[in-house]
Every structure is written in structure tokens, then in C-alpha cells.
Image: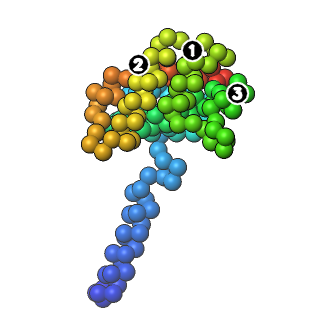
Amino acid sequence: MLSPQDIKDLISSIKSDCKDTLLPPENGLEAIGQPVIPFALVRSTRGYLEKITHQINGAYTNGWYDASAVMIRRLIETLIIETFESHNIASKIKNTSGDFFYLSDLISITLTETSWNLSRNSKQSLPKLKDIGDKSAHSRRYNAVRHDIDKIISDLRVAVQELIYLSGLK
């Protein structure tokens, strides 16, 4: 027969084992499915772009639409920076302290940059993608719903693919 202390120790051990085995791995999981961004767009680019894409798709699949929108915003911001860096003109998107500008300025500068010819579709898409990410990240009373993400998926695909090519990642 187990003593009360033995039972407490056993429960503590079980809790510890469950915590270690039931949580996702330290580096996260790959998304199941590709409902927002086809993974083929980012495969073999940069590991952090692949992880962001998994998070966008995984959050959407789980119904965490604000999380998906914020990660969409992050992906766009990252790809814009990658594009400027690959053309050796990153100084155009940095302040005097060497920090990158906020996304609104990054988009404005990207839309007028003459080192590349951004398509009309991407020019129209970038502000929409920023808007959904901003609302989800900064509006206290806004909660994204599936339809919010669904209506920007084609814009996202166009912008992501174009920025990946302009950045030389593919």
C-alpha cells in the first residue's frame, strides 16, 4: 500500500512526464495542410521563412485567425527586408540608428523602389496584407475571423511569391 507521500510523489512524477511528452517540440511543429500559403513557395529559402509559413497555416487550421494575420504581417515585413538586402540597398529602409523602418514605411518605399518592377497586383496587395495584420496585432476590440484571412489569400500568394523572386531566394 502506498503512503500519502508516495502518492504525492507519483502524481508529481506523472505531471512532469506528461508535461514533457504532451507539449509540442521545442522548435514547434510543421503545419498540417497548407490552407493559406502553399509551402512550395518558401521551401528551400530560409528556415525562418519556412517556420513563419508553418505558423500562418497552422494558426489558420486551428482557428487562431489573429495569430495567422500577425504572422502574415511578419512574413511580408521579412520578405521586404530580404528583398532590399539582396539588392544591397537595405540602407534605404533603415533609420539613422540602423533599425529597419516600420511596415507602413517599408511598404511605401517598396512601392516606389526603382531597382525592380513590382507588379500591379503586388502593389495593390501589400497595403491590404498590412491592414489585416495591424488590426489583429494592435486593435483591442478586433478579432479576425476565417473570412478575413480567406479574402486576402490570393493577395498574399501573389505578394509572397513575387517578393521571394525579387529577393533572389528562389
Badge 1 density bin: few <14, some 14–19, many ≥20, Cα 10 Å: some
Image location (x, y in percent) of residue 142: 28, 39
- Determine which residue is flagged by label 2: 154
User: Residue at the location (41% across, 69% down)?
Assistant: 16
| Quarter location, residue 110 | top right
Q: Is residue 147 visible?
A: yes
Q: Which residue position holds label 1?
A: 118
Q: Do the residues bearing badges 3 and 2 touch, measured as CB atoms within 8 Å?
A: no
Of the residues shown, which amino acid type is indicated by label 2?
A: Ser
Q: Is residue 152 left or right of residue 89?
A: left
Label located before the other in sequence (1 or 2): 1
* SS for dot 2: helix
- Residue 101: quadrant of the picture: top right
Answer few, some or many: residues within 10 Å of disc 3's Cα (few below 14, many 20 plus, some between 14 and 19).
some
Q: Which image quarter holds the C terminus?
A: top right
Percent position (x, y) of residue 77?
A: 53, 33
Q: Residue at x 66, y 44 (%)?
A: 97
The residues bearing labels 1 and 3 have C-alpha atoms spaced at a distance of: 16 Å
Q: Amino acid at mark 3?
A: Ile
Query: Residue 89 has which mark?
Result: 3
* Mark 3 element type: loop
Residue at (26, 42) in percent of width and height: 141
Q: Residues within 10 Å of mark 2 (few under 14, many from 20)?
A: some
Mark toward the viewer: 3 or 2: 3
